[in-house]
Image: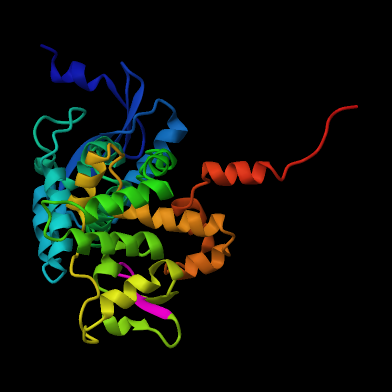
Amino acid sequence: MKSPKEEKSKWSKVAECLYRYVPSGQYFALVKVGGKQRRVNLQTSDLATAKRKRDDEREKLQKINQDTIKRTLSEQVKGFLETKELLAHKTQLRYKRVLNALCDYEDKHGPEGLLGDRKMTKIDKSTLERFYPVLVEKAGIGTAKDYLEVLKAFFEHAKEDKVIAENPAEKIKDTRDKEDKAEEKLPSIDQVKKIINQIRNERHSDTGKESADFLTFLAGAGIGNGEAAALLVEDIDWGTNLIHFKRLKTKKHFHVPIYDSVRELLRRRCEGLKPKDHVFGVKSIKKSLKTACDKLELPNFTHRSFRKFFITRALDAGADPRVVAKAQGHKRSRLVLEVYSKVTDEKMHEEAAKVKFSLDS
């Protein structure tokens, strides 16, 4: 066993609150945390870099309330969720799902045990980069994005409360290939027709006709599931030939034309209803859609697939991207072009036929 004197000889003070561990050459900063001094491994053997990192550590500590320096992730999550009690029930569930999963995560690259028992100051970007793929392994792109926003909001709240100095989730990104997923999820017009007919003629369904009409509207008007489910008779203005919506995520109002593809459907649906009545009697057709796709041996298309279907068909038909974007409740046409649209095989052949020149001498 080495004596205290021998152990002390391994350390060399090189600057104010900066020490070099002689055997490894690594530099350590001496900082005061929670009224106690501790060494922080700066993970460098370069003196100039060590001084800069020492100063960074000091600056971080100045941003942290020393009374919360020992607060664990679980303790912070409990307090944070209490601030979300007035949110919609569905939103609360999303926050709880993500943050409880974070607390229950066992990070094999850090101290043993659950992440919830770890101090907030010990959770860094690399920890979250290991956790996030596990969290969204089976989630769709939209859900994964929502989960990431929860993480960012949680750590930003902790930063504002001076529990941590920086938001470790701020620069986390979903690196999954969105383009490949979009390719898998876009149905052809023949597939759309087959799915609608399958749902409409389903023998064991009490809502087959309702669900088929709902899907026809999604594919024929390019509207999201939530907006379509909330549609009231009074939202349809036959005089101006417009349908008025409120985008659920942004709460902003927008309107779309009454497309020929859904005109007769809407007239039939509204017949005999009062202005405040809902146009459609179903809120979601997720189950019916999956059943139809399975029976037809097609990919498991989602509500979002039919929105992409509409946008792609509209753009292929020559519609102005700015108009399509506005009809989707978006200000920027670039978002519609990048996220929702796809070049169909038919469009590719059509455009290829326009390229005519000869290389013969």
Q: Residue furthest right?
A: 361
Is residue 203 or residue 210 the one in the foreground?
203
> Residue 214, image x and y in percent?
27, 63
196 is within the stretch colored magenta: no
The quadrant holding residue 119 is top left
**Left or right of 189 on screen, residue 30:** left
Classify 74 as above or below 223: above
Q: Quadrant of residue 330?
A: bottom left
Q: How is the image coloured?
A: rainbow
Q: In front here: 36 or 341?
A: 341
Name the image quarter holding the N terminus.
top left
Residue 179 in the image, given as x and y percentages of width and height: 44, 42
Whether the magenta-drawn stretch holds residue 247 is answered as: yes
Please name the residue shown 44% across and 81% down the image.
241
Question: In the rendering, at what x and y percent does residue 47 appear?
Answer: 43, 30
The residue shown at (11%, 29%) is 112
Q: Residue at x 13, y 58 (%)?
A: 93
170 vs 3, nearest the viewer: 170
Residue 332 percent location from the top left of the image: 51, 64
| Residue 106 seen from this side | yes
User: Total marks drawn?
Assistant: 0
Which contiguous range is marked in magenta? 242-251
- Whether residue 34 is visible to the viewer of this picture, yes or no, is no
In-image side of 355 versus 54 (left or right): right
Residue for point 13% across, 33% down: 106
In the displayed structure, 361 sits above or below 86; it is above
Q: Is residue 16 left or right of residue 274?
A: right
